Amino acid sequence: MFENKERTSLEELGEFGLIKHLTDNFKLAHESSVKGIGDDAAVLDFKDKQALISTDLLLEGVHFDLSYVPLIHLGYKAVQVNLSDIYAMNGVATQITVSLGVSSKFPLEAVEEIYKGIELACNKFNIDLIGGDTSTSRQGLVISVTSIGYAAKEDITYRNGAQEGDLLCVSGDLGGAYVGLQILEREKQIFLENPQIQPDLEGKDYIIERQLKPEGRRDVVDLLAQLKIKPTAMIDVSDGLASEILHITNQSDKGCTIYEDKLPIDPVTYETARELGLDPTVCALNGGEDYELLFTIKQTDYEKLKNDVDISIIGHITDKNSGVKMISKSDVVHELKAQGWNAFKN
């Protein structure tokens, strides 16, 4: 990426010079950001709101592969996946901190690309970068993002509030990020075997973007507020739909029934999965990294939401003894199991 450009050593700047260089363009926009970068700690003031805080860690070789992930996309995604956790609490994200572990052999220009992606995400979602840290890493690139936001106490939505009879809803479509990853991995292997062959990604733009550049669903939180709907439970789809459903049912002490024919799967995802010999439904259930919002609502809120094309009602909450199951298109009952991403197994 930087072979034909002048490269600047990180050692020339030093830690504090690097932080200043990378964060000079970031300005504070929120009244709650009393003090940002430049002191021993940031200072925030949410007044009568409750603070929401979440942290994610991205490790090279575990969460991303630099052979096909552009650095600008990596910076963008690192922020987005973290903001998604705040939105999953029915909150508004306002600040982030970013910590970076990077090899001293990494040129400044490469780190700048990561921060360009971070800046793009901050600008798009009105987020203040208020702090972080940098350090040398001997084990590959490490990015840790902490997101901070707020919500009124009565608006915060937990995973444990689902009630029997509630409708189970999901935003957007599922499985695209996983299928996009399979395409990227396939093309990587082809390239390693024959570097003369260029990647064939024609017609796969949507699912590639789902993998490399996911979007946190702040718009869904805004929509629910406009419709005066408070979900009874909510979670973001990071590890796979089945896994997230089980989080809600386990913490709510309930069961659930979903319907295969109600699962939202984009045509490109469906056709590409078939092309790769994969079951599109399994990709939707277990793929992960879609970062859509999965939530439950009271049946009385159905009329408010039924005409929104971006929200799919995929099932309903049942009593605990009924179990957690999916009714297939051929009316076969399948028990749902968590087979999505496991950070200590995959």
Image: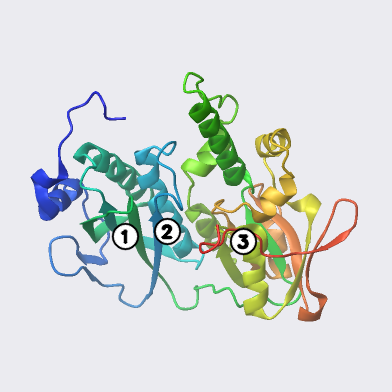
Determine the CA span between mark 2 and mark 1.
9 Å
Amino acid residing under circle 3: Leu
Say above or below: 206 vs 64.
Answer: above
- Residue named by callout 2: 82
State the SS at label 1: strand
> Residue 166 appears at what percent x and percent y?
72, 71
Asked where in the image residue 134 lies, by quadrant, the reply is: bottom left
Question: Residue lying furthest top in this view?
Answer: 196
Say above or below: 326 vs 60.
Answer: below
Q: Locate residue 91 relative to residue 246 in the image: left or right.
A: left
State the SS at label 2: helix
Q: Can the viewer see residue 230 in this picture?
A: no
- Residue named by callout 3: 294
Amino acid residing under circle 2: Asn
Look at the numbered discs 3 and 1 and tell me whether their residues touch, using CB distance below 8 Å. no
Question: Residue lying furthest right in this view?
Answer: 331
Look at the numbered discs 2 and 1 and tell me whether their residues touch, using CB distance below 8 Å. yes
Asked where in the image residue 255 lies, by quadrant, the reply is: bottom right
The residue under the point 14% across, 69% down is 40
Amino acid residing under circle 1: Ile
Q: Locate residue 264 relative to residue 51 in the image: left or right.
A: right
The residue under the point 57% across, 54% down is 292
Q: Residues within 10 Å of mark 1 (few under 14, many from 20)?
A: many
